[in-house]
Image (cartoon, rainbow, N blue to C red):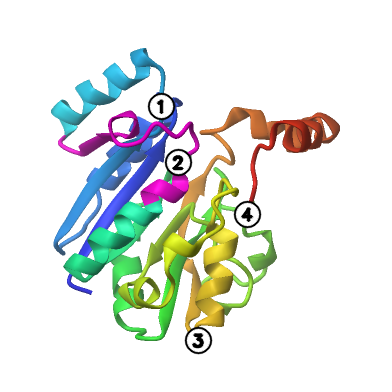
Amino acid sequence: MEKLHIITPVKDSIDSTLETVRAIMASLLDVPHTFTIYNDYSTPENTHRLAQASQEMGFQLVNLCDLTDHPSPNYLFVLQRERRMCIEEQAGLLIVESDVTVRPETIAGLWEAASQRPDAGIVASVTVDETGEINYPYLYAKGQENQVIDTRRHCSFCCSLLTPELFQRVDFDQLDQSKSWFDVTISHRSLQEGLHNYLLTTLPVLHRPHGSRPWKQLKYKNPLKYYWLKLTKGLDKI
């Protein structure tokens, strides 16, 4: 792994996104890297805010409306595009979602953990709430704090590094285009290809679940409505 691509997919929720951006740009990271925001059809007002922030803060901004007319979400398009670029540059891909705040040491720690494990497909940070308690989507890791877990469970893309070895073995062009999200699928494919997925409870990141997709809070507040929307509108296919 010679380089790191850091990306944050965004659709509106600009305040939380900018918090994510500030934390990433304050990282203690001494390896070649790029940082790109993928703007997935945010409103014109929020797109303008992102453009201003890009100029002021120095991250790259890609407006997906300039590259595809496919409606949001365009997670698959982003993953396919990044895989091609990462293969060309022998780079790893770190996905930090816009409801996550990394610590200064997080990204360097993920890079080091991945670099030390040639069998790694995915290396992920565990997520915690404001009190430091492990939260969704890693509730299964409670009681395993301060460990490096070789997990058979899926790694969420809240804060996960996908390795060059994964890109060589898993063709994202073959993924199911009817789905919306791909962390479960890619985690399983990584294992099927003989790689290992590591969850680092030694490197927790703050996660405000579904902060970038508020409608998904219905899963906890009004599950009947959530599953009705999921069924009738085809939302949130994993």
How far, Cα to Cα, is label 3 from label 2? 28 Å
Asked whether residue 102 appears in the rendered view, the answer is: no
Q: Are dots 1 and 4 in contact, CB under 8 Å?
A: no
Residue topped by disc 1: 41
Q: Measuring from the top left, give residue 44's x and y in whole percent.
A: 35, 15
Residue segment shown in magenta: 58-78
Q: Which mark is residue 194?
A: 3
Residue at the location (52% across, 60% down)? 175
- For the residue pair 52 and 76, the one nearer the viewer reads as 76
Query: Please, is residue 37 above or below residue 110 in the view?
Result: above
Find numbered disc 4 in the image and state the secondary structure of the residue it sits on.
loop
Residue topped by disc 2: 74
Q: Which mark is residue 137?
A: 4
- Please report whichever mark, 1 or 2, sits nearer to the chain's N-terminal start: 1
Residue at the location (35% across, 67% down)? 110
- For the residue pair 29 and 46, the one nearer the viewer reads as 46
How far, Cα to Cα, is label 2 from label 4? 21 Å
